[in-house]
Image (cartoon, grey):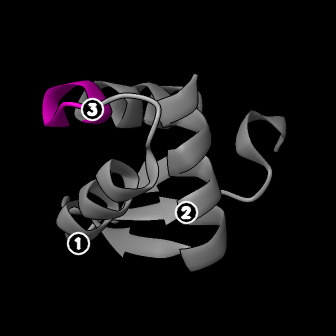
Amino acid sequence: MVVDANVVRIMKARKVLMYQDLLKDVMTQITLFRAQPGDVKKRIESLIEREYLERDPDNKAKFIYKPWGRYI
């Protein structure tokens, strides 16, 4: 839940972000434990499935925040 919250908070502020930038920001902001890149990637995929984020159709490494999540 810590990773999910950080990803959503970062994306809410930035709206659009490349994968490497998002990964770097999440890893920097989590101080409770050392987040592993693979775990962050899984959480990002979960947020995409739950419709909080989506991939840019032209660039699969770019993520777009969906303001209303699954409630649209």
Q: Which residue is mark 2?
A: 11
Sequence-wise first label, 3 or 2? 2
Mark 3 residue crowding within 10 angstroms, few (<14) / some (14–19) / many (20+): few
Q: CA distance from mark 1 to mark 2?
A: 19 Å
How much space separates mark 1 and mark 3, taking CA atoms? 32 Å
Q: Earlier in the sequence, mark 1 or mark 2?
A: 2
Report which quarter residue 24 is drawn in. Answer: bottom left
58 or 47: which is nearer to us? 47
User: Mark 2, residues whose alpha carbon is within 10 Å: few (<14), some, or many (≥20)?
Assistant: many
Amino acid at circle 3: Arg
Q: Can the viewer see residue 52? A: no
Q: Where does the C terminus fall, quadrant-wise? A: top right
Q: Residue 52 or 57: which is nearer the viewer?
A: 52
Element at label 1:
loop
**Res. 21 visible in picture:** yes
Label whose residue precedes the other's in the sequence (1 or 3): 3
Q: Disc 3 to disc 2, how far (Cα)?
A: 20 Å
Q: Mark 3 sits on what residue?
A: 34
- Residue that numbered label 1 is attached to: 58
- Magenta stretch in the rendered image: 35-40
| Quadrant the N terminus occupies | top right
